[in-house]
Image (cartoon, rainbow, N blue to C red):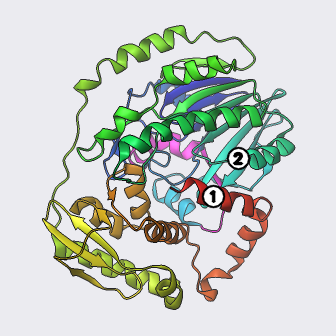
Amino acid sequence: MEIRLVSHASVVIKSDVSIWTDPWLHGKAFNDSWSLSPLPAFDEALYDEIDYIFISHEHPDHFHVQTLRSLPEAFKNRVTILYQKNNSEKMFNAFKRLGFPNAVALPHRETVDLTGQTKVYCCQAGTMDSALGVISGGEVVLNLNDCEINAGDCRRILSDLGKVDVVLNQFSIAGYSGFQDYENHLPQQSRNILDKMMANHLDLRADLTIPFASFIYFSSEDNKYINNYSNKPQDVAEYFAEKEQKLAVLYPGETYRTGTEHDSTAALARFRKFYDSMETLTYDTSKKIPLEEIAAAFDNLVRHLHEKYPVSLLRLLLKPVTVRIPDLDLTVVFSVASGEFCEDKEAAPDLIIKSQPLHFGFSYPYGIQTLGVSARYTLIKNFPNWRKHRIFFSLNNAELYLRPKFLFTPHNLNFFKERLPGAWNQFLYRLKVMR
């Protein structure tokens, strides 16, 4: 098989068919907080070769609406979208609205024939992520992208696939939990990502890893500090060399053919030259959003949560949160349980968030997740309470509602049945990494 790097998390995997993963060719992501870096390398001649598009999950750096909407109509009508089968139809409805009439739901931990030679395998992780295995000609390429998996998950994947030749993996910071003393947390977070890459590589008994997801920079004025702690391809290469494990570094536009030796020297030199010019990158400043609009967005969110979740559970688990909004020079207290949203000049803040990202967080089901991925808040205190909020908002975005009439639906029951093997292991692991 041939693997061509296009951009962040985006490759074209070619056997007797071609699969394009997570297209992102232009524009920004995560409430205009991430930008591509370096720029993509996509040859438009590939439109005639690509047969399938795999979307790993709904985060906007993988499900990039602006890119998908802009693709040629004839291409949209010809290709087939591959997406994980879960408890919701919302993504398949979104594909149709974007002009893709053909989509296939990939079942959890099963192989699906694309041709007589090539099969695909989808393995879900957490409430959102999924990995794609491509099996062809006796070789297996596993695209892990954002999946947080541990040794137990790797054993299950190996049991399903038999072997893994090449792993495609994330290599740098993809969000931050907002701790105020970031200079103490972010270096370790970067190191942990390298450790995770190596653990996945060894646990999957892979021949080679390709670092392919993290070709972005944090591009807002209030998150650009993250860039000082990001891993570069050179960091990954040195780490794998130290462990005497095989790595293939690709620059956008370059290819790797499975089963061959790969010299990363030229790609690493191009990356060094690119990162030497980082001072020319641009950063956005968000506009102010009036408090009345933030309050209205919160009120809509609360009414939805009260409809979908037992209010008694919200009262038990979610305590009020105090937020300092520096660009409005005021402090508010909000309570998901009671619906309260009010100013409080005397309260010490739990969080510091500017008005635009706070408004965005309340306005969309994925908004609070975006706050963390975009690294646009500061956590001062009461982390356990905020973590519970993040868990609830993740469940809400996944449409896993806890009122019985919404929870025990045929879609959900089938989803729980399919995900039961390994679910407890995944749940404990997600709690561990959500820090």
Q: Quadrant of residue 306?
A: bottom left
Which label lies toward us, 2 or 1?
Answer: 2
Q: Nearer the viewer, residue 68 or 197?
A: 197
Label placed on residue 150: 2
- Where is residue 75 drawn, in percent x and y? 52, 39
**Segment tinted magenta in the rendering:** 65-88
Q: Quarter of the image containing the N terminus?
A: top right
- Where is residue 273 drawn, in percent x and y? 36, 13
Q: Report the residue at 32% width, 56% height from top.
A: 378
Q: Locate residue 382 relative to residue 236 in the image: left or right.
A: left
Amino acid type indicated by mark 1: Gly
- Where is residue 305 drawn, in percent x and y? 45, 81
Mark 1 lies on residue: 126
Q: Nearer the viewer, residue 196 or 304?
A: 196
Q: Is residue 219 visible?
A: yes
Q: Locate residue 199 relative to residue 55 in the image: left or right.
A: right
